[in-house]
Amino acid sequence: MRAQPQASHYIGGTYQESQDGTPFDSLYPATGEVIAQIRSADDAVIDEAIRTAKEGQKVWAATAPAERGRVLRRAAEILRERNHDLSVLETLDTGKPLQETLIADAASGADCLEYYGGLAATLTGEHIDLGGSFAYTKREPLGICFGIGAWNYPIQIACWKAAPALVCGNAMIFKPSEVTPLSALKLAEALTEAGLPDGVFNVIQGFGDVGAKLVAHPAISKVSLTGSVPTGAKVAALAGEHLKKTTLELGGKSPLIVFDDADIENAISAAINANFYSTGQICSNGTRVFVHSAIKDRFVARLAERTSSAVLGDPLDEATNIGPLVSKQQLDKVLYYMQVGQDEGARLVCGGGTANVDSLPDGYFVQPTVFANVTDDMRIAREEIFGPVLSVLDFDDENDVIARANDTEFGLAAGVFTKDIQRAHRVIDQLQAGTCWINTYNLTPIEMPFGGYKKSGIGRENGHAAIEYYSQIKSVYVEMDGVEAAF
Ligand code: NAD
């Protein structure tokens, strides 16, 4: 299976290849086959991306916001028309089952482009009455923004960064994860076809060294990273040295709290979505499932029964629920934590190791895994695993579970299941997390701001909130009388 792009990079409205960049392969995680060969951006490619972005941004910033919106909405329609092909490409690059990519990847990217396209003409400033004289504010672009993607939702992440950046009149240079380099190029094609001026959205490939070069580049005004906490710390330090604005979407170890009055089947559905969707490779996953001790045994037994019915296998078969992990490196990491959980004394309820898929013996498959009797100090309850490993922890008391849920360096997301409306809001109010759910989990519509407290991030993506992070306000005082001076 091949998914070779015309060239590695997309710059100035066209594909471009680098002469000197480090070559690397993109693999299909279900077979380990090479599907594309890519080259990292060399200095000439980076210089060209910056040059065209500067030119494109001038044209784009002078384009009426309503027209910018039309371009984004046309690009949304192009992604929708191509959804099937884009979903197959995303499945090949990530290993996520087609059942998911058909509805969650390019489709959510299209929703994002449509949403910001719709906001475009509404982005206005204020008039401030100063009693005769007045002031007004304007929302202006930042310049060239640099987006850095993770590998779990490649085209969605590219859209979540590009759409709010572009609607504010910025240009963006986007570097996908080296693990999943392909679909961002397709977004760039769609934007060009939709009428985006050349250079306004460029894609360059590479590893962390290419990322760091761009973060430090004087022409870049803002950096938006989706990635792990250690990478976030490096990017923030480098950006801080150059006083660049940053948005950081980082990792998590989020709590999902199930009270004894919850609808148990719904709570189990949420726990499944919060741990096994995308083979557990989702930053906001509710990997610490706190279950009230009165319902714990029932919850765990039914969760195990439903988990054992998951269809694991060929990601291109639409009946498949769970595909492989994204890479051999991720497979090794997840298997390591499955062993750590057993060594720490958690009770292995189901799963716990590799999964054999007869037709795909070289795929990076693991069994969806549930641990019960997990305690707060265990590493599987403290460290982000980023795989299908669910930990059930018991609790009895509301205040106690809130304190335990918050006892983490992360703060990306949290969920509560209860039929008691006052308790739901009381608990949510005390949880230290940027994105919360009551009686559901992991739904992230584009209208709702998304981002982390504590080490899970800085800034917000999505919703009106993202506009604040891709624009700056200019205040203008207008004197309507004379100017007095002391002498
Ligand atoms: P990662 O941190 O290894 O890499 C992320 C990106 O950063 C890649 O494109 C990589 O090339 C780049 N990078 C690495 N070092 C860099 C440096 N020094 N300077 C600039 N760029 C650099 O993350 P990953 O393994 O690709 O993704 C998984 C992680 O991402 C998990 O921790 C997950 O929780 C997190 N994530 C967060 C969100 C969110 O919205 N909060 C969404 C998806 C994934």
Image (cartoon, rainbow, N blue to C red):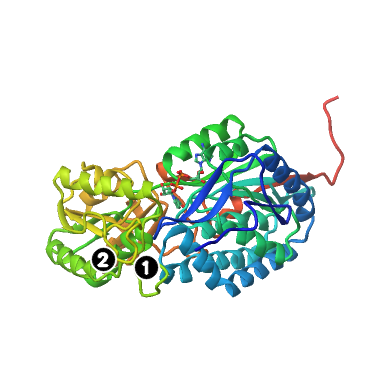
Residue 367 x, y percent position in the rendering: 26, 59
**Circle nearer the N terminus (1, 2):** 1
Residue 395 x, y percent position in the rendering: 17, 54
> Can the viewer see residue 127?
no
For residue 418, the mark is: 2
- Mark 2 is on which residue type? Thr
Lateral position of residue 315 relative to residue 148, left or right: left
Picture layout, residue 27 above or below residue 358? above
Q: Quadrant of the C terminus?
A: top right
Q: Which residue is mark 1?
A: 314
> Can the viewer see residue 250?
yes
Q: At 67% from the left edge and 56% from the top edge, which residue is drawn?
A: 166
Lateral position of residue 116 relative to residue 445, left or right: right
Q: At 56% from the left edge and 68% from the top edge, which residue is drawn?
A: 111
Residue 181 x, y percent position in the rendering: 54, 53
Q: Nearer the viewer, mark 1 or mark 2?
A: 1
Residue 266 x, y percent position in the rendering: 27, 71
Q: Secondary structure at mark 2?
A: loop
